[in-house]
Every structure is written in structure tokens, then in C-alpha cells.
Image (cartoon, rainbow, N blue to C red):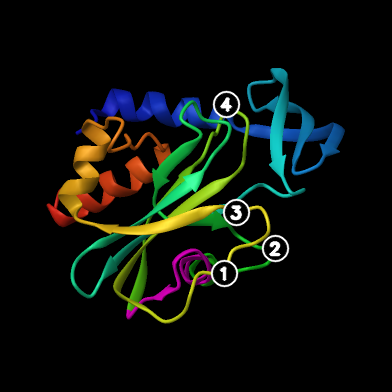
Amino acid sequence: MMDAYSKEKMSKAFHSLKVKDSELISSYQEGYIGKNVYKVTLNDGSTRVCEQITKNKRNGDAVVIIPITQDGNFVMIVQSRPNTEETVVVEFPAGMVDEGEDFKVSAERELLEETGYAAEEIYELEEHYQDQGCSKALIKTFVAVGCYKVQEKRLDGSERLEYVEMSYDDILNMIKNGDEKEPKIRDANSKIALMEYTLKKRGVL
């Protein structure tokens, strides 16, 4: 447990480093990725220039879904990701939140679109910033329980993916190991989601 001195020190740091004023200097958008540049003034009087990455002219808020079938299997996605070293990755279903869309509604929609599965129950597990050094994108993880097939997947024009059912231990092995026959899971959002799920199940959180 944090001692009184550390608590006071943290409280003072939070107050002095909080943004007091923010001024948009420039905004650039080309295709899907854009950038906003701000001049910010902190409560301690210091100023700095901050760059914020945007996606589709928005923050880039997104959802990650941990789908668990009625048989207890987990549904993972094999997806084309050309920017990675492998160019093909394994990850949990995920997607961006549409403008004005509720995060839970987005999770239900993405699960259905990418896998064709619906869930008996879906609940929020955790949230985290994707890259708080240069982005406002908030990622919320949901657990979808009792998943069952209701339709074929419906992808947009640019998506290339397949879904695969596997066990919890299979996912752990793919995070720890991985080889030419069994890819290694390196996606940060998927790792965070599984870690949080595991800690919740063990009663740590």
C-alpha cells in the first residue's frame, strides 16, 4: 500500500502536470491517418507542443472482444496486418467504435461482423489507452459469454481475416512460444485482454 508521503507526492504531481489550456496549432489528414498539433500549458506554467494521431478524423476509440463459446472455446482472429513483421497475425476480434456509438454496441457489432457469432451475455472487462504518448484512443475490452454461430462473417472491403476456435491453453502457448506452424501472438491489446481476464478469474482484481 502506498504510504502517506508517496500519496501526497503523487497528488501534487497530478495537479501541477495537468493541462490548464490547450490550443490547436495545426491539423493534417491524409487518408485514414491524421495528426493534430496542440500547444498545451500545464498548471505549473510550463508549455509544450503535443502531437496527436487521429484515425478516420476521430480519436480512434476501439473495442476488443474475448468471445467464449458455449463449449468453452475462445474465438480468435487470423488477420492480414501488412505493417507487422509477420504480415499475418492472431488476435482477439476488435474494431473501431463508430461516431456516437456505445462501446458495448460496438463490441456486439464487431463480434457479429468478424465471426458471425452472437453472445448470450457480454460485459465490459477493462479499459486502457492504446498509446497515450501520441493518441487519445481508448480501448475497452469486453467478454462475450455463451457465443454461438448465427450468420457468416460480414467484412468491409479492406478486411481479410478468418476466425478460429481454440482453448485457453492454446492462446497461452501462442503468447509464450510460437513457431512456423503456430504463430506467436504479439498483439498488445490481445495480451492485455487475456491478462486482465486471467487476473479477474483468479480473484486478483
Numbered disc in front, either 2 or 1? 1
Q: Amino acid at mark 4?
A: Leu
Residue sitting at x 20%, y 50%: 198
- Disc 2 target residue: 99
Q: Rounded to the nearest whole Å, what is the CA distance between mark 1 and mark 4?
A: 45 Å
- In terms of sequence position, does the residue under pointer 3 or pointer 4 come before the other? 4
- In terms of sequence position, does the residue under pointer 1 or pointer 3 come before the other? 1
Residue sitting at x 54%, y 67%: 106
Residue sitting at x 70%, y 63%: 99
Report the magenta residues as a range: 107-120
Secondary structure of residue under mark 2: loop
- Disc 3 target residue: 159
Q: Amino acid at mark 2?
A: Glu
Q: Rounded to the nearest whole Å, what is the CA distance between mark 2 and mark 3?
A: 20 Å
On the image, the x and y values in percent for residue 183 come to: 32, 36
Q: Amino acid at mark 3?
A: Glu
* Disc on res. 154: 1
Residue 118: in magenta span: yes
- In terms of sequence position, does the residue under pointer 2 or pointer 1 come before the other? 2
Q: Amino acid at mark 1?
A: Arg
On the image, the x and y values in percent for residue 85 come to: 49, 26
Q: Rounded to the nearest whole Å, what is the CA distance between mark 2 and mark 4?
A: 30 Å
- Disc 4 target residue: 17
Which corner quadrant of the image does residue 52 belong to? top right
